[in-house]
Image (spheres, rainbow, N blue to C red):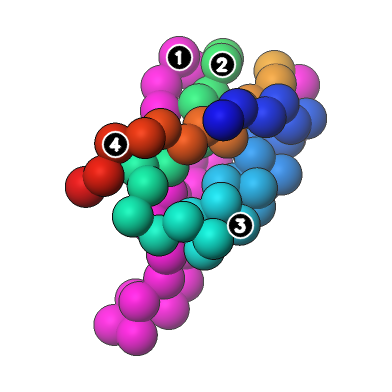
Amino acid sequence: MKSEHESYEAAEKAAIAIKKRHPKLYVTVFDAKAQRHTLVELPTAANPQHGPNHNGQGNAPTPRKAVATGRHH
């Protein structure tokens, strides 16, 4: 499942929604500009923020994709 978004934040939000619905899936956000995937994990009680998933590329005009694969981790 893939979806394209205008900003990193929008792609991350979509990825978190996917992860909430299917917590065992391996979900990443692909940054087309940097050519890298960032793993998305749900916040835990020990780590209530999802900040570590953010790569600081928030408003770049290059589209981002939220990607869910069938791999379990």
Residue in view at x 67 percent, y 29 percent: 3
**Magenta stretch: includes residue 65:** no
The answer to which of 56 and 27 lies nearer the viewer is 27
The answer to which of 27 and 21 lies nearer the viewer is 21
Residue in view at x 47 percent, y 36 percent: 68
Near mark 4 (Cα within 10 A), the count class, few <14, some 14-19 or many ≥20, is: few
Q: In the rendered structure, which amino acid carries the disc numbered 3? A: Ala
Residue 70 in the image, given as x and y percentages of width and height: 36, 35
Q: Is residue 57 above or below residue 24?
A: above
Tags 1 and 2 touching, CB below 8 Å: yes
| Among the two numbered marks 2 and 3 on one chain, the one whose residue lies closer to the N terminus | 3
> Disc number at residue 35?
1
> Disc number at residue 32?
2
Residue in view at x 43 percent, y 78 percent: 48
| Among the two numbered marks 3 and 1 on one chain, the one whose residue lies closer to the N terminus | 3
According to the image, label 3 marks what residue? Answer: 17
**In what element is the residue under mark 1?**
loop
Q: In the rendered structure, which amino acid carries the disc numbered 2? A: Ala
- In the rendered image, the residue lying farthest to the bottom is 45
- The main secondary structure of the magenta stretch is loop
**In what element is the residue under mark 3?**
helix
- Is the N terminus in the top left, top right, bottom left or bottom right quadrant? top right
Q: Nearer the viewer, mark 4 or mark 2?
A: 4
Q: Nearer the viewer, mark 4 or mark 1?
A: 4
Residue 17 in the image, given as x and y percentages of width and height: 61, 57
Give the magenta part as a residue range: 34-61
